Structure formats: structure tokens, C-alpha cells
Amino acid sequence: MNRLLAIILLSSVAAHAAPPDPNGVEARLAGAALMDGQAFATVESLSDHIGQRLAGSPAADRAVEWAVATMKAAGLKNVHKEPVKVPRWVRGEESVELVAPARLPLRATALGGSVGTPKDGLTAQVVEVSSVDELKALGDKIKGKIVLFNKVMQRTRSGDGYGQVVGLRGRGAVEAARLGAVAALIRSVGTGNYRLPHTGGTRYDDAVTKIPYAALAAEDAEHLHRLIARGEAVQVKLRLGAHRDGEVMSSNVVGEVPGRDKPDEVVLIGAHLDSWDLGAGAIDDGAGCAIVIETARLLTALGLPARRTVRVVLYMNEENGLSGANAYAAAHKGELAKHVAAMEADSGAGRPIGLSVAGGAPSVALLRSLAEPLRTWLPTDVRSADWAGADLIPLQAAGVPVLDVNQDMSAYFDWHHTAADTVDKIDPIDLALEVAAFSVITHALADSPEVLPPPTAPPRW
Amino acid sequence: MNRLLAIILLSSVAAHAAPPDPNGVEARLAGAALMDGQAFATVESLSDHIGQRLAGSPAADRAVEWAVATMKAAGLKNVHKEPVKVPRWVRGEESVELVAPARLPLRATALGGSVGTPKDGLTAQVVEVSSVDELKALGDKIKGKIVLFNKVMQRTRSGDGYGQVVGLRGRGAVEAARLGAVAALIRSVGTGNYRLPHTGGTRYDDAVTKIPYAALAAEDAEHLHRLIARGEAVQVKLRLGAHRDGEVMSSNVVGEVPGRDKPDEVVLIGAHLDSWDLGAGAIDDGAGCAIVIETARLLTALGLPARRTVRVVLYMNEENGLSGANAYAAAHKGELAKHVAAMEADSGAGRPIGLSVAGGAPSVALLRSLAEPLRTWLPTDVRSADWAGADLIPLQAAGVPVLDVNQDMSAYFDWHHTAADTVDKIDPIDLALEVAAFSVITHALADSPEVLPPPTAPPRW
């Protein structure tokens, strides 16, 4: 017995390296994130004082001024705005109603970018499919109909259930219109069942008729499904006031913690400042804005500038077209070779659960060694991923290494893109833990003698 | 070791009586509830084909016809309507908006029975309290203000968190108006955080000015709370189109499984047919309607009439005034002495978790013995309670023994009285288990030589 115990204890010791330095940079960052954390106050301020900030709206302009003031107050240097042209899309009044076999108001909302219906609405029979293949198999039967894309999103910790459905949100209207549909509906891409429609971006193809496309609450999608499954002819009336109202100028907001040694080399940490219009944009992406501003504030307040510059970028219009991401990549084209890494915080405010990097074994190995000080509390799950954040896609395409502190997204898609994206969903302690992990990795990337190899190519977006 | 094991096994055997008869009535009811259950189909039909059925509305009339047809199809005898006068209350258009310190649409809805605001709305500063005592302590400071009652409801399996808050919904407008408030708001009495306002009945006192009273989504109550806690002056604008539109005649719907021995003695099993207007009334109380109709159907289909008559009563207007409950008690006054027991299914569609009876130790003891066949799967938690269902209050007051099959209500108040009270919230297996327990107890009460002693007096309602 004693011998066995000794073996167990020995292997346990052997499996663990020396504990991180209790006086080290990492412990100071984590301690400050918890005990002096301003991240929750930051996202609370953005949510309560600005609230929703759809790109192109007056509220988005106020958010830009808020970001400049907040970054300056946090001690960042070189705080400035960079121009971004964004679409102005207006939701307008909207109502969606089941008209046959019985009248019932449905909870629905236009997808971002959708065209509207005629003023008096549009009524047609609904055909249900769960995939584009199913749609195509119906061929002529789609003509004159409203297509309902009804696919259930799975709840997972990594949030990867989203990627399995969101493609239908992006291309559904185009695919349905090709077959002559007059409008499309999609079961909300989310995991909640609280009669909440989830909006989100959709896309058109200029070669195909643009038809209105709206998200239905899960309950209403189920309702139509039951009727259709019983063989009833289901008619829905859409009245969507959604329309494009040209383009306007807006801004990314940028600030820095200058590097002490190689100030021209950059570790970019980003989040997006815009939000959808239904809630307060607290988890998407006020939390991310707070995480990156707080990371820079802590590095400054603790007197811990790294060898390289840490640059905070709050992107405008991630949600409805990645305008800010493209503008940043274009404006900084000549400087991208000196971007040694880029991370984006755009996964809510859940606890950190691991790390991922768009790269192969050498990238994973280096990141694992940089993450070593986190191993006592963060699962050292460092994995290879295809990408690391929507706003980072243009950087990744240009060869900038991109990585991500993965968060627990189990509940994120209950609220994401809905009216219930409000600040009460954020646990301040989980948010502080995320800041701790994010700031440790940021500092390590900015201070390490080694840099990540170039990334794998991004997926087609 | 072996001796200890033997002792454990022996005590385990001693603690359990012989198993219930596998060919007994109880096993047949439970087997049929699971394998031939129509309860889910019944509530699905009511939810999908009638939907919301606020008392006094045309949909409520359709629900009455649905109930008559469904009870007849289920094989009940003496199916008929009994007249009930109900108020007609109309919600109308409504909007609630934060106007200072910044404009923000709030998710809110008038409480049932509330008066409306002037057509152009009503704007005033908000004062927050969590109890009537706190309100009273503010005295003159309430004058001209909107009172926000902000008390968090606790989630529990028994659902008793509801009773700890719902009193504020009933009397809040009266108490606020006594001190000169111009309107009142209440944090939704519910457990969800999905930006859903929960409606529900409220009351006025003819001696006190009637002021509008609306429920706010939990998120919006939190938002106002944060602003007020920071010392900001919070102004809200209410526009509520709610109004009373006289009274109309409606009906309770009644059907029976006649007793084979003592047909004049009655075991009443009830639920309420009306619902609030926001959702489909699936869990409140379509599920209850399905449970009692299914119980009667199974007793008929299995050829198991009991000695006494089992009477199904679907009450009209439980939600907005207990009109049907009072009408039934008045119309059947001469017969109530022969009502040996009454149960109501009005707790959703969760699993059965125990039994309760409005009575002392002798009532508990008899109910425990009647529930004996359920002990292999239902926790034999039989407890004494103050009451057993809102529609049973007039019967309890008249001396009819009342009891309840308790259901797991952990999730019930996430959806109760909201737009998300839809049929997808019901697990057909849990509903069938509830039918199994409910039908076994109903049959036992209707067949037992012994009857329950008179109940304790009901609480003041």
C-alpha cells in the first residue's frame, strides 16, 4: 500500500513542473484582474449608457466617442479613430403572422441586411426544409413560396453548434430565391427557448433576386413544423420594414501600450464595438471590448509594458459586413508583416477553457509553452483551429498569426443577437478570469523572444 | 462483513411492503397513460388550434367548443356547459420606454385587469422598493411617481418562490396609489432571464384611485435598479392601451365518468380552460386540461368506473378573477356536501413529486394509504398544505376536501404567463407520468370506502 502510494505521489510530482512564480508577471496580472478589475464596470457603462449600437446608427457614433474616452481614461497611448465606411441598415417596423390554418402572431425579426417586404406585406405558403440539399431537391415546388429553414442548433461548450447552422443564415435567401421563393424564414440560430428571435447577418448575390429573410423564434418554427408535419397548408404573412439607407462614415477605435524594446512590432488584441440592435450588446461584444481595454489598462497600471507594442483595436461593424476588419487590414497593409500575433475577444463572457491557434504543431507547441503559467487553473488544452475570430480573417489571410482564448460558450447562444443580450448575463468573476487569461497570453506574446509561425489560410468566408 | 451485509439486506426488506399488484388497477392506469397516452395530443391540439384564450375573448368561446368536443370524443358522459359571467379585458397597444437618463425601449406588459394610461402616455420618475413596508416608509416621496416593485423570485422545485412575491402583483397598484403614485411597475414574477415580461392578475380597491400597473422583464428591472443605485434620476414613459370592456357570458365545461355504486357522490378533478393572452396557454393550463380529460378517458377506456362519480370541470377565467370557480360553487351549492374530494391540475407539466392535502394528520394519513401503490416510483412525500388550487378555494371554503398531486415546478415560472408558454415546453413522458399519478389518486379517492375529513379553512385570497 505504502509503496503504491509512493509511486502515485512520485508520478504526480513528475507530471508537474515547478509552480509559476508567485511574484511573477502572471500572478500580478491575475491578482489585479480579480482585485482591481474594471472590466465589468466597463461593459456595464457601455451597455447602460450607450446600449445597442448598430453600425451606421447615431448610437454607434456615441459608442465611438465612448471608446475614445474610455481608452484614454484607461491610460492607453496613441488613442485615435480610423475611418471605416459602413452600410446603414434600418430595421423599421416589422410583424410576422401565421394566417392559415389559424391566425397567430409569430415572434420574428428581419436578419441584418435583409430587404423588406412591400408595405402591405407579403403572404405565401410555407415550405419547410432543414438544408440546402433538401431545398434543391424540391426544385419547382419552391416557386412562389416562403422557405422555412428549420435546423436545430446544438448547445456545446465550445459553441461549435453555431457553425453547423449559421451557414443557412448567410446563404438561405440566395438559395431560396434561385428556386423562385418569395421570402425566407430561418429558425433562430440559437439555443434558447424563450420565444426570442435571434437576428444576425445575411448575404445577397447581386445576380439573384433579393428576397426578405427573417428569423423566427424557436417556438414558432416548431409550431409551423407541427402544422406542416400534419399536412396542413401553412400560410404566413411577412411585413418587414427593413431597408438599406446608403453608407455612412464611422470609425474603428485604436489605442496602444507601446513596446519598450521593439515598439514597431505589434500584438493586436481586438473586439468589436458595434452590436445588433435588439439588446444592449453586452455579451456580443461589450464583454470583448471590456476584456481588451482592461488588458491594456492592467499592463499600463502595473508598469508592465512588454518588449513589443500591444495594440487594442475596437472594430466597427463586425456584425453586418466586417467593414472595420477590412478597413484596418487595408490601412495597415504595410505594417502587417510586423504584426506578430492577433487575438479577438468575441465569444461572450464565459470562463476561459483553453486556447486555439490557426496553425500546425509548431504553433500549438509555442502557444502551449507561453500558456504554461496558466496551467494551474486553465485547462492546458491548446488546439489547432481553422480561424480565430471574424475580424481577424483579413489579417489571417495576410499572414498574421491568429489565436484565441476559448471561452465557455454553453449559454452564450441563448442570448446572442437577441433582445436579452443585456449586462445581467455577465458574471463579473468569470469576466475577470477571462481578463486574467487574456492578459497573461497577451503579455507573453508581446514579450517572448520567439514568435508564432505564419497561420494556416483562413476558411472561405 | 457478511453479517453486516445480511443486516443491511434484512432492514431493506423490512422497510418495503409487498410490491403493488402487477395486474392491479394502478398498473393498468399507468401502463395505459404511458403506452396509449393522449394527453400530449390533447394539449397540442388546444395550443395549436385555439392558442391563447383569454376569458371574454372570441378565442375563449372557441376553447369552450373545443372542450365540449374533446370531452365527448374522450368518452365522458353528461358533457355540458355551465354559464359563467366574465369580465372582458383588452390589452390594446402598449409600449414602455425609459426616457431619462437615456432613451431605451423597455420590455413590459400590462398586468391583467390593469387600467390604461392616457392615450399619449404618462411619464414620471421611478422610485424603487422591494416591499410594501419599504413603500410605506417612503410616504410623501411616492407622490406623482411611478413605483417599481423589484423583488427577485426564487427558483424552487415546489414553486413556492411564487407565493413569496405574487402578493406584490396583486396589491401593488392599490398600495402605491394610496400614497399618490401615478403608476406602478413590477419586476416580472418569474424565474427566466430572457427579456420576457410575465403578465398576471392584479386587483383594485374601489376606494382607491386605479393606476396603471405593468410587469417589466427582469433585465429591465435590473437596468432601472442599476441606474437608481447610482443615484441617477430615472424617468419612464408608459403607454398602456389596457381597458375593461364590460362583461360577457362564457362557460365552464363539465363532463363525467358516472360512479357505478354511488353516482351522486363526486370526486371533482379540475383545471382551467382560459389562459393569458401572450403565449399559447400550453403549460398554464392546457396541460392541466389534458391531464384531467385524459384521466377520465382512461377510466372509461379501461372500463374502470369507480364507486363514485369522477367529474371533470374545466373552469373559465381562473386567471382574471376566478369567475368560473365561484360560478361552479354557487351553482352546485346544494350538492357540495356530496363532493368527497377535489383536485386541480394547474402546475404545468412537470413530473409528479409528491402529494399535498389541505388538512391535518388524519387527512395526510388517509392520503398516504391511498397513494401506497405509487410508492415504487413517486416519492411518498404527502404533506399538509394551506390550499390545493385557486379554482378550489370556493369549494374548500364550503368544506370540500381538497388535495393536489405536486409537480416539479423548477422551470414552470420561466415561461408561465409569458409569450413563451408554448407546447414545446412540455415533455410528453413527464406529462404521461403526471397522468399516471393523477389517475391512480383519482380512482383511489372515488373507490375508497373511507373519505377525507373536512379541510382546513382556505387562506384569505
Image (cartoon, coloured by chain):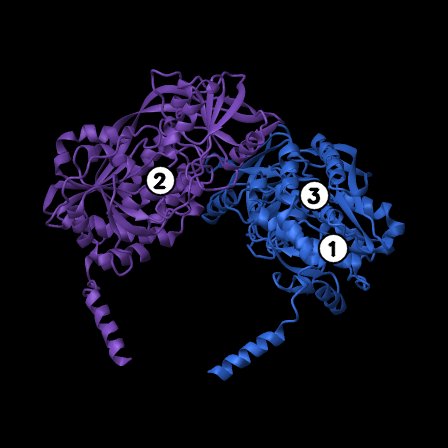
Chain colours: A purple, B blue
Nearer mark to the viewer, of 2 and 1: 1
Vertical position of residue A395 compared to residue A34: above or below: above
Say if labels 1 and 3 share a chain: yes
Task: Please name the amino acid that badge 1 sits on.
Answer: Thr
Per the model, the C-alpha gap separating discs 1 and 3 is: 25 Å
How far is the residue under mark 2 from the one under mark 1? 54 Å
Using a 10 Å C-alpha cutoff, classify the residue at mark 1 as few (fewer than 14 neighbours), some (14 to 19) or many (20 or more).
many
Q: Nearer the viewer, residue A445 or B75?
A: B75
| Amino acid at circle 2 | Asp
Percent of width and height locating residue B39: 65, 44
Per the rendering, the mark at residue A168 is none
| Marks 3 and 2, how far apart at CA | 40 Å
Q: Which residue is mark 2?
A: A285
**Does residue B396 appear to the left or right of B431 in the view shown?**
right
Three-letter amino acid code of the residue under disc 3: Glu
Q: Residues within 10 Å of mark 3 (few under 14, many from 20)?
A: many
- Closer to the chain start, of discs 1 and 3, is 3
Determine which residue is flagged by label 1: B442
Q: Which residue is mark 3?
A: B319
How many dots with numbers?
Answer: 3
Residue pushed farthest right? B334
Residue A424 vs residue B364, the one in the foreground: B364
Assign a secondary structure to mark 1.
helix
Q: Secondary structure at mark 3?
A: loop
